[in-house]
Amino acid sequence: QVQLVESGGGLVQAGGSLRLSCAASGRTLSNYVMGWFRQAPGKEREFVGAFRWNDGSTSYSDSVKGRFTISRDNAKNTVYLQLNSLKPEDTAVYYCAAALAHWFGVTEWSRYPYWGQGTQVTVPS
């Protein structure tokens, strides 16, 4: 089992920034990929980015590439999602998730068995 606890959402004006945190515990995280997903009202859950713990590889969706960055703090077993240049269309509930490392590069949320509780990000138009 992997337990994930998220924090850091909020309301921010367009063009602003937020940093989301995902604190992980449970299994040896080097065997896992940490994914970030988001879901806006009435829309499907979509892939935002992923971080492979053992080598630091990252991947991002085209919609956030260049604006969002994933990083980690090994000592805290925490992964961060830095959201810059936010747009109203970034408004969603953001989730972190974990899957075994071989799923890195796969964007389907159903491949991730472990999920955080979600945190709301709102960017008013």
Image: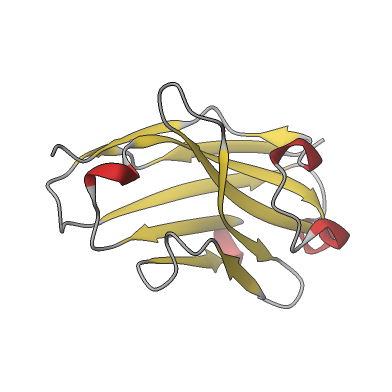
Which residue is pictured at 77% across the width and 72% down the height?
54
Along the line of sight, the residue nearer the viewer: 120 or 8: 120
Q: Residue furthest top?
A: 42
Residue drawn at 75 percent across, 39 percent down: 2
What residue is drawn where x is 41% and y is 33%? 119
Is 84 in front, or is 43?
A: 43
For the rendered model, the colour scheme is secondary structure
The quarter of the displayed image where residue 10 is located: top left
Q: Position of residue 62 (x, y in %)?
A: 49, 64
Q: Is residue 125 above or below residue 83?
A: above
95 or 110, nearer to the observer: 110
Locate the N terminus and report the quarter of the image it occupies. Answer: top right
Among the 4 quarters of the image, the one containing residue 28: bottom right
Is 110 positioned to the left or the right of 47 in the image? right
Q: Is residue 105 left or right of residue 42?
A: right
Q: Is residue 116 left or right of residue 66?
A: right
The foreground one among 12 and 109 is 109
Q: On the image, which quarter does residue 85 sit in?
A: bottom left
Q: Residue 44 appears at what percent x and percent y?
A: 55, 31
The percent coordinates of residue 31 (x first, y second) are 84, 60
Location of residue 116 in the rendering, given as x and y in whole percent from the top left corner: 59, 33
Q: Is residue 39 above or below residue 41?
A: below
How many numbered marks, from 0 up? Answer: 0
Quadrant for the C terminus in the image: top left
- Classify 124 as above or below 51: above
